[in-house]
Amino acid sequence: MHRLLLGLLGAGMLAGMVARPPAAAQPSASFTAPIDRHALVTRHNPVVRAADPLSPLSLGNGTFAFTADVTGLQSFPEAYRPAPDEAPGRIPLATQAHWGWHRFPNPEGYTLYDNYEPYDTYGRPVLYPTRQGTPDGQWLRQNPHRLHLGQIGFDLYAADGTPLSLADLDAIEQSLDLWTGTLTSRFAIGGRPVRVQTWVHPAYDQVAVRVEAPGLDPGQIRLRIAFGYGSGAHYGEGAVWDQPDRHVTTVQVQEPGRVDWRRRLDDEVYAVRVLMPGDAVLEPAGPHRYVISFADLRRAEAVVAFAPEALPPVSPGVAETQEASRAHWAQFWSTGGAVDLSGSTDPRAPELERRIVLSQYLTAIQCAGPLPPQETGLTFNSWYGKFHLEMHWWHGVHFALWGRLGLLDRSLDWYRTILPRAHQVAQMQGYEGARWPKMVGPDGREGPSGIGPLLVWQQPHPIYFAELVYRERPTRETLDRFRDVVFETADFMASFAVWEAAAQRYVLGPPLIPAQELHPPRTTMNPTFELAYWHYGLATAQRWRERLGLPRDPRWDHVLDHLAPLPTHDGLYVNAESAPQTFSERDHRRDHPTLLAACGMLPCDRADPEMMRRTLHAVMATWQWEETWGWDYPLTAMTAARVGEPEIAIDALLYDTVKNTYLPNGHNYQRPGLTIYLPGNGGLLAAVAMMAAGWEGAPDVHAPGFPQDGSWVVRWEGLRRMP
């Protein structure tokens, strides 16, 4: 598998993963000249010269994304559609928006209450929705699911009218200009060149395309627009194409240069508009399928716009979309943070810089909407399109550290909208405050799972997010905006901790499943990371009370003063107090090494840095890295930086294993099915910001998380220190 990926990616791209040569010792330098951001960004413009199902390129605006094949549209979706058990897998082509959801009918009236099971909690039964294998559990997991809004592609023909396949295209060269958000796709049909430019509008959910093929007959290129029904597949593009009777496409407006459709799928409704030249002809070509014929291919163009319920009276045209895209991306790259590694002698620096630039782009187009993002963003569905709240930290914290807090802030008010539901869950289980779910859609209803409902490490996240906002905007308005979320979260956290009278301490679990999900819920107690995060969350909530002029909450203080210490064994931190065999049994050293997060992702408030340094070395030497996930590498780098091991921080960020592969389009590859993984991209950015700008209490040197031997020359600007 790993060798196959190496072949797909090419040796040149992975050259940065070889061992670095020794460099003469010299201090890191400070820099005053501004970074040439245009040069920094554009030297990493993705270029594709062959049709590769792992290299489609996406355009987007944070709330809407469109993923294209080498034609610049979605002309050959079957070549990118995942096949069962196919290695290394494919990246589907889809059109998705944060508002685009669908749910199947529920004639049986399935509810979450049908899926609860009791878990003994120190003598009292607490209910969790863990019965995922039942028919009702499967319906609740699948619904709602994110919807592929519409396939936009070309129907291509040879001069004699024969339909063309992807293999018939010659002279393929596709490039994404990151500075302008322009996707330019070149290919040839019968030796005659075709040039396609594609944009997504930064403020409207619409795709604009311009075609130039002066040597072709107009009938050789037609624009195709097709609509599917919602899909209940775990992974995929979010549509099925063989159930035309289950959805309705109605023409609302049809006039020269414009067609408006109304789409209905069960109870879901949305609108679609096409703008085209007045002499273009739109015709039906099958159920929910239309083609547009252009009169002149010397310059043919169209806009396809989407919206929930209804579109505005006027949609921007192609030229307006192009100009808006250019202005938006120039502004994006000219503001916020930047890291330039071009002066480094370590041969891995170009690859790390490439990952940094492309990760900024991908998270900006995929993870910056009003809802927490799913792990595959708006590219294709994973876990039915639902988002995982424990991953929200890895998707979004980097925005604050890179001076783009607003891109995280967009999704934070959603916690307030589901606060009543979170409060109801906590009450039903016998706790105070609000308990946040794990796997959810927009309504905040938990998805049944044998694991998800028992996770707890997402609970302090809203407090961490609120603190990031306050650090940037230390105002009464910020405090009032988040106070209910912060205080209700802290109330749950304090009541979830169990008092052990004999030991005079508070413990976490059982039942619970820690971030390292291999531990059994009915016996796991006091995981290292969760204990540290509980302390951080409650201590931060107390500071919020003080900022608001309120007295400290005595219950929170009692938990803070008596919370169990982080568990250790033989001078090392371990996964949990119930897992002292972390470093003696191999099976305990797989999945996420989150025992490191107590001094890395979090400040070392409760962890001893020297003991954590020894633990880091043990993790690096013995962990089963092939069974980890993409965010585990930046997690490890953060710990290495905090404990004074910058060389290990770099080694972790660029660790040579499949789960830490970054594809030509910048996506973090994991496995067939999960061929992209945005928590890896977001985690990389968070770790790099920390390593460059430092953290509270960091050594007073330039770029304290990078090696200080002169092999890394780190120029940075616009970053924020990590807490």
Image (tube, rainbow, N blue to C red):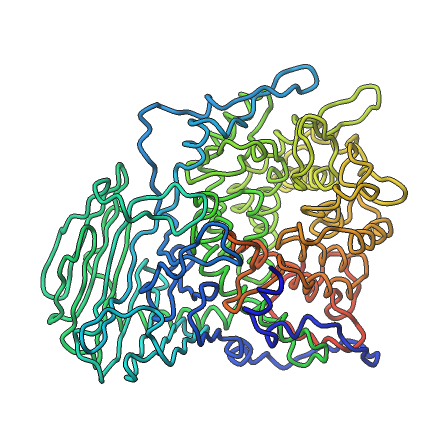
67 in relation to 495, above or below: below
Residue extending farthest to the top is 123
Q: In front: 684, or 150?
A: 150
Residue 554 is drawn in which quadrant?
A: top right
Point out residue 511 in the picture as x, y percentages from the top left corner.
Answer: 67, 26
Residue 566 is drawn in which quadrant?
A: top right
Q: In front: 188, or 355?
A: 188
- In this image, 154 relative to 655: left or right? left
Q: Residue at x 11, y 58 (%)?
A: 254
Residue 111 is drawn in which quadrant?
A: top left
118 in relation to 204, above or below: above
Point out residue 425 in the picture as x, y percentages from the top left corner.
Answer: 52, 26
Q: Residue at x 41, y 57 (%)?
A: 92
Q: In front: 228, or 516?
A: 228
- In this image, 31 relative to 206: left or right? right
Point out residue 447 in the picture as x, y percentages from the top left corner.
Answer: 48, 34
- In this image, 70 relative to 7: left or right? left
Q: In front: 185, or 268?
A: 185
How many numbered marks have been drawn onto this rendered protein structure? Answer: 0
Q: Residue at x 73, y 37 (%)?
A: 527
44 in relation to 264, above or below: below
Q: Quadrant of the N terminus?
A: bottom right
Residue extending farthest to the right is 570
Point out residue 697 in the picture as x, y percentages from the top left corner.
Answer: 77, 57
